[in-house]
């Protein structure tokens, strides 16, 4: 191998190592997010996010834009509803948040990585919870998909745009066939709703809607994107023209 070929090979290996290292760091960051969320450590969750004003969390049919709004979702809304406003768990409240099937892709030549992953959540109360606990005694399953973006700032990977699509809720007793939505969708934005989002996303809804969450990657063999009509979910034997439009993510940073 001549020196020119050797130098080219070393550069190629260096790029590969940098890509793999970045994707590993992003994967670890997302799983750390999950562990903090499990135990209602909401301030630690917020501290994982970028300070950029265009950072956001998309949750249900709402979008919380900027660090203050992200804090409003986690430190105020979730903490008040689930753990009485404290940072950390309370006895008898379960929020286990299993993360799996993660796919991480570093965007070449940028400080942005994209992530797709799944969550399966077990949530609810022990029967020793006081009767006045908000929502009362309840337990449920929840399943959803993430399509996120992460950004490297000053050498540190942070969450940039977290998009969580909670597909379904179901009780342990009746399953998802007879499903209730344990977390209601948003009807008003902030400040009309003091714990609400900055923006509403009109067409977002929960189970039995099964429209595909857009993929951040093309098909690995054909290189093609999935057709919009195949991303919809019509009622059985009905035309795709009668169903809700395909979901779209139109604001990828790169």
Image (tube, rainbow, N blue to C red):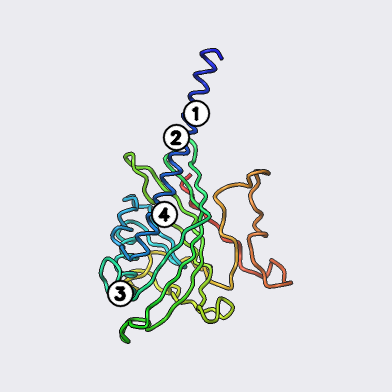
CA gap, disc 1 and disc 3: 50 Å
Q: Earlier in the sequence, mark 2 or mark 4?
A: 2
Q: Mark 3 Cα within 10 Å, few/some/many (few <14, many 20+)?
A: few
Q: Are marks 3 and 2 in contact (CB under 8 Å)?
A: no
CA gap, disc 1 and disc 2: 9 Å
Residue 251 percent coordinates (x, y): 48, 52
Q: Mark 4 Cα within 10 Å, few/some/many (few <14, many 20+)?
A: some
Nearest the viewer among 3 and 126 is 126
Q: Residue furthest left?
A: 86
The mark closer to the camera, 3 or 2, is 3
Q: Which residue is mark 1?
A: 13
SS at mark 2?
Answer: helix
Q: Earlier in the sequence, mark 3 or mark 2?
A: 2
Residue 102 percent coordinates (x, y): 51, 52
- Residue 179 placement, left or right of 194: right
CA gap, disc 3 and disc 2: 43 Å
Q: Earlier in the sequence, mark 1 or mark 3?
A: 1
Q: Which residue is mark 3?
A: 91
Nearest the viewer among 113 and 118 is 118
Q: Residue at x 61, y 47 (%)?
A: 218
CA gap, disc 4 and disc 1: 27 Å
Q: Which quadrant does the N terminus fall into?
A: top right
Q: Earlier in the sequence, mark 4 or mark 1?
A: 1
SS at mark 4?
Answer: helix
Q: Which residue is mark 2?
A: 18
Q: Earlier in the sequence, mark 4 or mark 3?
A: 4
Q: Which residue is mark 4?
A: 31
Q: Which mark is residue 218?
A: none
């Amino acid at each position: 191998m001549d020196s020119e070929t050797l130098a080219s090979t070393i550069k190629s290996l260096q790029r590969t190592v940098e890509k793999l290292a970045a994707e590993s760091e992003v994967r670890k960051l997302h799983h750390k997010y999950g562990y903090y969320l499990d135990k209602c450590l909401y301030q630690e969750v917020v501290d994982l996010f970028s300070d950029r004003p265009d950072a956001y969390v998309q949750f249900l049919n709402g979008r919380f834009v900027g660090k203050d709004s992200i804090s409003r979702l986690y430190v105020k809304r979730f903490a008040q509803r689930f753990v009485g406003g404290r940072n950390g768990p309370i006895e008898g409240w379960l929020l286990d948040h299993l993360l799996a099937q993660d796919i991480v892709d570093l965007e070449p030549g940028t400080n942005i990585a994209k992530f797709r992953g799944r969550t399966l959540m077990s949530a609810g109360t022990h029967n020793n919870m006081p009767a006045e606990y908000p929502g009362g005694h309840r337990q449920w399953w929840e399943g959803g998909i993430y399509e996120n973006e992460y950004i490297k700032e000053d050498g540190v990977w942070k969450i940039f745009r977290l998009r969580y699509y909670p597909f379904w809720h179901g009780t342990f007793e009746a399953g998802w066939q007879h499903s209730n939505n344990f977390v209601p969708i948003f009807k008003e934005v902030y400040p009309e709703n003091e714990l609400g989002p900055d923006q509403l996303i009109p067409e977002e809804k929960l189970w039995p809607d099964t429209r595909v969450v857009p993929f951040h990657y093309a098909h690995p063999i054909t290189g093609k994107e999935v057709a919009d009509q195949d991303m919809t979910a019509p009622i059985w034997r009905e035309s795709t023209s009668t169903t809700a439009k395909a979901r779209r993510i139109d604001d990828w940073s790169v």
